[in-house]
Image (cartoon, rainbow, N blue to C red):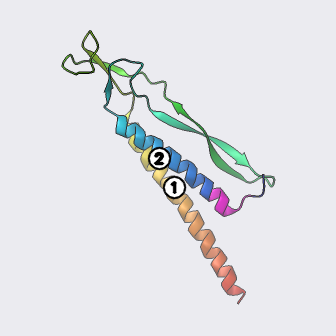
């Protein structure tokens, strides 16, 4: 891999945080949904990150994969629901809404941190160019 610049590093980190934010948004959108069986019930998604190193020892991040949570959907008796099974049960999505909201706030902060890194690097480059004039 070629040498990574500060822009590469922050850009890749922002891209990874965007994947994280999208999976969190998907989880929150599916929270509270029901299915007719435990197998069909939605389970939250989680991205798995991997460190990427360049030849000079600089590191950034990449999304290795998006995994499905092992959390178990909860069964609820609701015979009036059209998705209910023969026993009148439905399964609610395996999503912890509170944890997902915390995840969303943390992701937004980390994304913003990388935006600040890029703004600082841009400012330093502009100052250096101005000194050379």
Kind of element beneath mark 1? helix
Q: Secondary structure at mark 2?
A: helix
Which of the two residues, 76 or 88, is positioned nearer the viewer here?
88
Residue pointed to by mark 2: 21
The answer to whether mark 1 and mark 2 are in CB contact below 8 A is yes
- Can you say whether 48 is above or below 79 in the image? below
- Nearer the observer, disc 1 or disc 2? 2
State the extent of the magenta-drawn residues as a range.
4-10
- Residues 8 and 105: in front is 8
90 with respect to 24 (left or right): left
Cα separation between marks 1 and 2: 9 Å
Which mark identifies residue 43? none
- Which residue bears the numbered disc 1? 111
Badge 2 crowding class, 10 Å Cα cut-off, few under 14, some 14 to 19, many 20 or more, is many
Furthest toward the bottom, the residue is 133
Q: Main secondary structure of the magenta part?
A: helix
Q: Is residue 68 left or right of residue 12?
A: left
| Image position, residue 33 (x, y; %) | 32, 30
The structure residue drawn at horizontal position 70% and vertical position 90%, both measured from the top left corner, is 133
Q: Residue extending furthest top?
A: 87
Residue at image x 46%, y 45%?
A: 22
The x and y percentages for residue 66 are 55, 36
- Residue lying at 40% horizontally and 22% vertically, measured from the top left: 40
Near mark 1 (Cα within 10 A), the count class, few <14, some 14-19 or many ≥20, is many
């Amino acid at each position: 891999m070629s040498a990574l610049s500060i822009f590469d590093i922050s850009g890749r980190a922002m891209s990874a945080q965007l994947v994280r934010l999208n999976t969190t948004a998907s989880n929150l959108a599916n929270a509270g949904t029901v299915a007719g069986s435990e197998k069909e019930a939605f389970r939250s998604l989680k991205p798995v990150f991997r460190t990427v190193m360049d030849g000079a020892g600089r590191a950034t991040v990449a999304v290795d994969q998006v995994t499905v949570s092992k959390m178990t959907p909860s069964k609820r008796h609701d015979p009036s629901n059209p998705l209910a099974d023969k026993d009148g049960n439905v399964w609610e999505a395996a999503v912890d809404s509170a944890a997902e909201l915390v995840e969303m706030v943390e992701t937004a902060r980390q994304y913003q941190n990388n935006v600040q890194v890029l703004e600082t690097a841009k400012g330093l480059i502009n100052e250096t160019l101005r000194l050379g004039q």
